[in-house]
Amino acid sequence: MEEIIKQIVQKQIQSILDNNRYTISKIVKKSIMPVLYKMVQDEINREFLAIAEKQQPLLDQDIKNQDIKNNDSLDLQEQKENSHNFKQGSLNKQGKYLYCIVKGNEDEKFSLIGIDGNKVYTICHKELCAIIHDCKAKPYQSNEEKIVAQWVMTHQKVIEKAWETYDVVVPASFDTIIVGDKEFTEEENLKKWLEDHYDDLLAKIEKFTGKAEYGVRIFWDANLMGARISRENEEIRKINEECRSKSKGASYMYRKKLENLLKKELENQAEYYFKDFYNKIKAHVDDIKIDKIKNNNSDHQMIMNLACIMPRANSHLLGDELEKIDQMESFSVQYTGPWPPYSFV
């Protein structure tokens, strides 16, 4: 009797879950998941800060380009290619490592522990402040993947702390270093750079005020989508039926034809849904950057990878649109943020 009651209770619970799946999903995604994301990010930041405070500088190792995955989104190779802003053979051995630019003044103190435990502070020019630390006039180099990952995470942590403090930042790429030359010190060159790009930097700050970057990744189940296409596509259904009545040799040719046709139709469907989802998302954001699609060999395949910037106050509008996509058969959505505008600088 106890077992029968247990089974009845389990069926009733399952029935409640099935009948209220949409409501439960919405509550979890809107109320619980943001809190969990923040808790995880805060814990990561605390751990890396603790490591950074203890670690001695490591400056004499060779560069090795590595792909470090942070939520499958961090590409260190691209970071390295874009970020070594220093002059080869500089006579000045010191540099200023640049994290980001903010709007502020000397009276607004900003201090933090940065990469390799270096003290982070500001150098200001007119209304602009560069958040920096003192360093050698050479790029950060290491063969150790964990060390490079720590540097990048600390770089992001400083930018995010500045974002919280000043409300808006213009982020610099990882390993951006300003150096001196025969005429000017590294600090003089930094201020000269701020003056040369003053109007452009102020325009970016104005553009990013009150806004944040959000990541959108959309996946589909290739097996489920393939099965649906096989049911709905008349030509594929016809070839499938003919294949069953053919000899072993002939059926092999039919199967190859079927595979090619199904592959082409999947590509067509992926293109159709990409355009459809892109237009729906575009209606709620200020700008979109299309990033590389990252897939493994699993059936859970990414068909869209976007970075979006929009007012933080409007993020729920995009969230509601993505919720509708997430409820569609065969599709799932990964929605992250808010982040500083890394992709739009």
Image (spheres, rainbow, N blue to C red):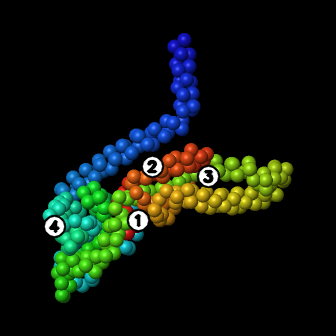
Helix, strand or loop for disc 2: helix
Of pointers 3 and 4, the one earlier in the residue sequence: 4
Give the Cα separation between the discs numbered 3 and 4.
56 Å
Question: For residue 120, which numbered disc appears in the image?
Answer: none
Of pointers 3 and 2, the one earlier in the residue sequence: 3
Helix, strand or loop for disc 3: helix
* Residue 88, placed above or below residue 133: below
Of pointers 2 and 1, the one earlier in the residue sequence: 2
Q: Which label lies toward us, 2 or 1? A: 2
Give the Cα separation between the discs numbered 2 and 1.
21 Å
Q: Position of residue 85 (x, y in %)?
A: 30, 77
Q: Mark 3 = which residue?
A: 222
Give the Cα separation between the discs numbered 1 and 4.
28 Å
Badges 3 and 2: C-beta atoms under 8 Å apart?
A: no
Helix, strand or loop for disc 4: loop
Q: Mark 4 = which residue?
A: 106
Q: Position of residue 45 (x, y in %)?
A: 28, 52
Identify the amino acid type marked 4: Glu
Give the Cα separation between the discs numbered 1 and 3.
29 Å
**Along the viewing direction, whichever of 284 and 85 lies nearer the viewer:** 284
Identify the amino acid type marked 2: His
- Res 285 seen here: yes
